[in-house]
Amino acid sequence: MNKPLILVVEDDAPIRSLISVTLEAHGYRYVTADNAATAIMMATSHNPEVVLLDLGLPDLDGVEVIRKYRTWSNNPVIVISARNEDSDKIEALDAGADDYMTKPFSVEELLARLRVALRRLAISQSGAPEDPVFVNGPLTNDYAAGCAFLAGEELHLTPNEYKLLCLLTRNCGKVLTHKYITQKIWGAAWENNVASLRVVMATLRKKLEKDPECPPFIQTHIGIGYRMLRVDAAGENAEE
Ligand code: CA
């Protein structure tokens, strides 16, 4: 199998070289860009498996790079940003980024995020548009039957809890913003009704994460949204 190709978009030379050296040491191939125009050109010509994207670029905001890239590619984009503001991360996620890291970040964190992104890519490229049954450790979601099971036992979910679960399982590994989730569940009129989302999330979690032995399926990103984590069959968090 070819080594995955990563496009590193970063105008800060020391950070760019730190990331490149890390990628090379861990068996990845990489190409780099130090501005948005080059990034778009490199993405077009090299079709990278994953893009690591700095948001603060000299010529164009990184969010615009995501918007352009999403017109032709669904490959994972991990935003790397010096900005602490949640609104920047939310804007990037809503534009189609999969995940984000805030500078300064550790090399281990970078590699872990990359593995998550590559796994998501492998699943999305595995042939069938979607498996009729989603399996994540002890959790099973049978889309066709419209029901979910935990360790073989059917979960009794309300319609909104089930909609929320489907959003999370269909986007396993990806951070979903509050706005994205509320729009999908309640429609545009309810956009950003985070209070309602919290209520449904709390009741879903009670049913889903009742086994203290099993690590949580859902990760909270405070002020941003939620992500379903991949757990392995033994019930250990396989990621992060
Ligand atoms: Ca920058």
Image: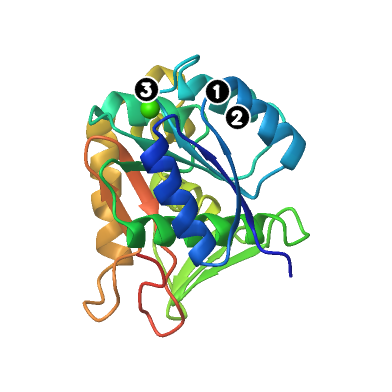
> Quadrant of the rendered structure where residue 36 is?
top right
Query: In the figure, 44 relative to 109: above or below?
Result: above
**Residue nearest the observer in this picture, 40 or 125:** 40
Query: In the figure, 170 relative to 108: above or below?
Result: above
The amino acid at mark 2 is: Ala
Question: Which residue appears at 66% of the width and 63% of the height?
Answer: 3
Quote the CA–CA distance across marks 1 and 3.
34 Å
Q: Is residue 46 left or right of residue 93?
A: right
Q: Which residue is mark 2?
A: 39
Please say if the residues under marks 3 and 2 sit with CB atoms less than 8 Å apart: no
Q: Position of residue 141 (x, y in %)?
A: 53, 64
Q: Position of residue 157 (x, y in %)?
A: 39, 57
Question: Which residue appears at 72% of the width and 42% of the height?
Answer: 47
> Mark 2: few, some, or many residues within 10 Å (few <14, many ≥20)?
many
Quote the CA–CA distance across marks 3 and 2.
36 Å
Question: Which residue appears at 26% of the width and 29% of the height?
Answer: 86
- In terms of secondary structure, where does tag 3 sit? helix
Tell me the tag on residue 36: 1
Query: In the figure, 191 relative to 184: above or below?
Result: above
> Quadrant of the rendered structure where residue 72 is?
top right
